[in-house]
Image: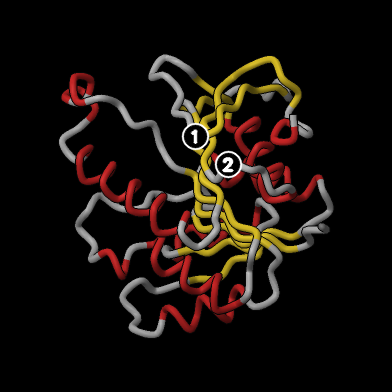
């Protein structure tokens, strides 16, 4: 399948910018779904076509459907909240519904590490709400046929072009992966339809091209 247009919620995050670079290298266009006007200039500077959304707008669902009407794939690479947003108004719910209405079938949600309770105290007071929102996003979007990528801790360093992926897995807390390699993995998931809907990913030695078909 050819992918010519990709829409990304979280396009101006570190991972989103890495994905923008991968998308451009493949000759495709990236549409950035933005919720802050301050990010528009940065998006344009990175070669991203910005679409500004107002999360408070009751008609945001229709705006999203229009924004996705001509894209081939969609990626949720932003935070999914900390539990303070009603589930039906969460980024995952809104984006999942809009993608379905627009007929977009290639989709990836970037999830998170799921540490056991013994390691949670030093990870922030909002962690439980954050993880609950991630679980909701995985379940909600997974039920719609999205693929879920659970990367190890993201780091800023050059990509190696290699990784290790585990079907249904979650990386260990001490594992890492570069944002560049994570972006390449997202692209691979968009291109192919691996048998497992959920993948853990970390730095490794397997070449990323074709990694989900190995």
Return the x and y of residue 77 as percentages of the image width and height.
50, 49
Q: Please identify the quadrant where the C terminus is shown.
A: top right
Of residues 75 and 212, the one drawn nearer to the viewer in this rendering: 212
Q: Pointers 1 and 2 in contact (CB under 8 A)?
A: yes
> Of label 1 and label 2, which has the lower sequence position?
1
Q: Which residue is mark 1?
A: 168
Return the x and y of residue 175 as percentages of the image width and height.
47, 17
Q: Could you give the CA–CA distance between mark 1 and mark 2, rounded to whole angstroms?
A: 7 Å
Whether residue 152 is situated above or below residue 81 in the rendered picture? above
Whether residue 98 is situated above or below residue 207 in the rendered picture? below
Disc 1 residue crowd, few under 14, some 14–19, many 20+, Cα 10 Å: few
On the picture, is 135 further left or further right than 146? left
Q: Residue at x 58, y 61 (%)?
A: 32
Whether residue 145 is situated above or below residue 88 in the rendered picture? above
Whether residue 184 is situated above or below residue 146 in the rendered picture? above
The image quadrant that residue 54 belongs to is bottom left
On the picture, is 50 further left or further right than 169? right
Q: Identify the disc placed on residue 196.
A: 2
The image quadrant that residue 205 belongs to is top right
| Numbered disc 2: secondary structure | loop
Q: Residue at x 73, y 25 (%)?
A: 161
Q: Residue at x 65, y 23 (%)?
A: 163
Q: Please identify the quadrant where the N terminus is shown.
A: bottom right
| Numbered disc 1: secondary structure | loop
Q: Residue at x 57, y 47 (%)?
A: 16
Return the x and y of residue 197 as percentages of the image width and height.
55, 45
């Amino acid at each position: 399948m050819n992918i010519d247009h990709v829409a990304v919620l979280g396009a101006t995050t570190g991972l989103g910018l890495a994905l923008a670079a991968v998308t451009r290298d493949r000759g495709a266009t990236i549409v950035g779904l933005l919720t802050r006007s301050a990010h528009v200039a940065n998006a344009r500077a990175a070669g991203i076509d910005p679409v500004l959304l107002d999360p408070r707008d009751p008609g945001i669902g229709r705006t999203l459907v229009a924004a996705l009407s001509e894209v081939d794939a969609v990626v949720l690479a932003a935070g999914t909240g900390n539990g303070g947003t009603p589930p039906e108004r969460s980024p995952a719910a809104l984006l999942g519904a809009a993608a379905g209405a627009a007929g977009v079938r290639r989709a990836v949600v970037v999830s998170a590490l799921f540490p056991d309770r013994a390691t949670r105290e030093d990870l922030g007071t909002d962690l439980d709400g954050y993880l609950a929102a991630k679980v909701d996003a995985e379940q909600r979007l997974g039920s719609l046929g999205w693929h879920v990528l659970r990367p190890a801790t993201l780091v800023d360093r050059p990509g190696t072009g290699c990784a290790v992926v585990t079907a249904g897995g979650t990386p260990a807390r001490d594992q890492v992966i570069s944002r560049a390699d994570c972006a390449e993995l997202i692209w691979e998931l968009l291109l192919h339809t691996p048998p497992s809907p959920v993948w853990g990913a970390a730095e490794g030695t397997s070449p990323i091209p074709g990694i989900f078909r190995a």
